[in-house]
Amino acid sequence: MDDIQDPVLDPVLDCLVIGGGPAGLQAALTLGRLHRSVLLLDSGAYRNDPADAMHNMLGHDGTDPADLRAAARADLAAYSSVAVRDVAVRTVTAVDDGFRADLADGTAATGRRLVLATGLRDTLPDLPGLAPLFGNVAAHCPYCHGHEYAGTHVAILGSGPHVARVALLLERIAARITVLADGGELDPPTAALLDDAGVAVRPEPVTGVCRSAAGATVTLAGGPPEEVGGLFVAPTLSQAAPFADQLGLDLLPSGCVRVDLLGRTSRPGVYAAGDLAHVPELPMPMAAVLTAAAAGLVAATAVDGDRLAERVGLAPPA
């Protein structure tokens, strides 16, 4: 790390926010409105990059995610205490006066508090042709994309217990539903739920998927293809950035950062918001643009409240 220079911002900022998606943008906006000095660090990579539109977002249903980010950037420009830098963070370390982020351009910045809003990475099932369709014809969340497949034949890839839940969520939306078990075996309760709901099951291995006039053509070994308007898949989730590991934060069985109701992590002074974190009472994050932005607001208010408590000499939160 010899190319890293001393922090370029002096004095030490109130807060560093890492991540330029809805959680990070909202955290920076909330802190900026309280005249806290904030630096938002944005790598330019976002979980919803594959999506051409976001849905189930009040006032922005069907909006391109990039348009929302641009509007949020314009909002931030009105607050002189907020700075934005389009640069990736290499490492984050604890220092005497807070937390230091070493940046990909060879500079660094330090903040007394740190908000992580770096999101998750989706690793798709190893199915030829799937990646170019993800975020449009293929999706993982019925709340975000189910309506767009209304009145069509919808397929669900996989054989885990989740396929029954997804099928039941879609039964009022899709004209027909088929579970593509891809060579896997459904457990008896899942098979019974699907049978009761009249959901067809194709047991054959799935060999590929490609775009078609209807949406997508799914090919299967030893059987006819399925023409579908939408395909639901279950990606494997992982942290999109290494900072939780670098800071030694507690993780949950989901692989997400454990936070309390205000977004505080297991390390004092570090907060997490958005898809990368959730409270232990949930099995996984409520992954949506609206909930991510709300988590950013909550974490920012916790940053401000904890700074106020520090100023008047109150004990830090447990």
Image: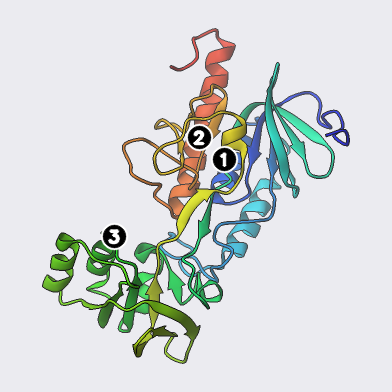
- State the residue position of label 3: 162
Tell which of 97 and 204 is nearer to you: 204
Q: Give the left or right position of residue 255, taking residue 311 as reference.
A: left
Count of numbered circles on the image: 3
Q: Give the left or right position of residue 21, taking residue 152 as reference.
A: right
Q: Are marks 3 and 2 in contact (CB under 8 Å)?
A: no
Q: Is residue 79 above or below residue 197?
A: above
Residue 60 is marked as none
- Label 1, label 3: how far apart the Cα atoms are: 32 Å
Q: Is residue 227 above or below residue 67?
A: below
Could you say whether the residue bearing mark 3 is in a helix, strand or loop?
helix
Position of the C terminus, as image quadrant, is top left
x%, y% of residue 291? 43, 49
Q: Is residue 254 above or below residue 197?
A: above
Q: Does residue 7 show up?
A: yes
Mark 2 residue crowding within 10 angstroms, few (<14) / some (14–19) / many (20+): many
- Label 1, label 2: how far apart the Cα atoms are: 7 Å
- State the residue position of label 2: 299
Position of the N terminus, as image quadrant, is top right
Residue type, label 2: Ala
Q: Work out whether mark 1 precedes mark 3 in sequence or the reverse, and give the earlier one.
A: 1
Q: Give the farthest residue toward the top.
A: 313
Q: Are marks 1 and 2 in contact (CB under 8 Å)?
A: yes
Mark 1 residue crowding within 10 angstroms, few (<14) / some (14–19) / many (20+): many
Residue type, label 3: His
Mark 3 residue crowding within 10 angstroms, few (<14) / some (14–19) / many (20+): few
Foreground mark, 1 or 3, reads 3
Q: Does residue 115 show up?
A: no
Residue type, label 1: Ala
Q: Work out whether mark 1 precedes mark 2 in sequence or the reverse, and give the earlier one.
A: 1
- State the residue position of label 1: 27
x%, y% of residue 9? 81, 30
